[in-house]
Image (cartoon, grey):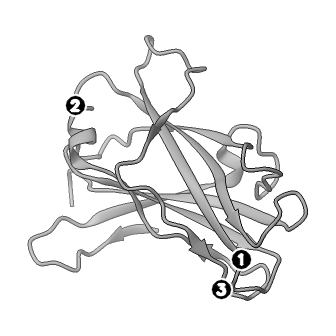
Amino acid sequence: MGSAKSKYPGAAAKREVLIRAHDFSGVTEGSWVPGATTDFIDLLFPLPDDMLVGNEVGLKVLWSCETTSTADKVTWRALYNKLTNDTTSIVTAPATALSTVIAEDTNIGTADAIQTTARGILNAAVTAAMVAGVDFLKFRINANAVTSLTLGTDKVDFLGLIIDYVPRYI
C-alpha cells in the first residue's frame, strides 16, 4: 500500500496499511465468512508511531462474494474504542461508530472478485483527543446488513481492512 500522494496541493499525503483478515481475532484462514449479521471479529490496532493525530483516519473493507448478482449488497460496520496500555481492559467491546460510517457496497457481479468499500472516517476531532495515553484502537467489524443475500448460505468473505492516516513525516 505505502504512501500516496495527495490529490490536493498543500494537503498531506496519507499512508495506507492493509490489515489482512487472519490478523483479526478468531480468524484462522485467509478470509472470514460471517454466518449472520450478529457475527463479528475484532482487531487490536497499535497506533503507528508516525501517525499525526488531529487528522482523520479512514477505513475501507476488502471483501468478496461468490454470487454474480449486482442486486447483492453488504453494509460493513466498524465500531471502535480507544485503549491505553496498562489501563484499559482488552475485553472492553468496541461500541462507538465511526464519524462517517462505511456505506452500503454493491456486488460488482463477478464471482469472488476483490471489492473495496467506500471510506469510513474517524474525524480529526476524534484523533486529536488521542494525543496522550491512547496506545491502541480496537475495531469490531461485522456485515451489519445485507440485501438479496443470505449470510450462512451465500458466501461473503471479509478479506481485510485498509486503514489510512496522515503520517507526521512525509
User: Residue 118 location in percent, x, y?
Assistant: 46, 70
Judging by the rendered image, the residue that carries numbered circle 3 is 108
Judging by the rendered image, the residue that carries numbered circle 2 is 131
Neighbours of disc 2 within 10 Å: few (<14), some (14-19), many (20+): few
Q: Nearer the viewer, residue 27 or 103?
A: 103
Q: CA distance from mark 3 to mark 2?
A: 40 Å
User: Residue 33 location in percent, x, y?
Assistant: 80, 56
Quadrant housing residue 73? bottom right
Neighbours of disc 1 within 10 Å: few (<14), some (14-19), many (20+): some
Going by the numbered disc 1, the residue's amino acid type is Asp
In the image, residue 134 sits, relative to residue 33, either above or below, namely above
Which is closer to the viewer, label 3 or label 2?
Answer: 3
Quadrant housing residue 75? bottom right
Residue under the image location 70 percent in, 37 percent down: 25
Q: Given contact means CB atoms under 8 Å apart, are the residues at marks 3 and 2 in contact? A: no
Residue extending furthest toward the left: 10
In the image, residue 89 sits, relative to residue 35, either above or below, namely above
Residue under the image location 45 percent in, 11 percent down: 86
Question: Taking 142 as reference, is 69 left or right?
Answer: right
Judging by the rendered image, the residue that carries numbered circle 1 is 72
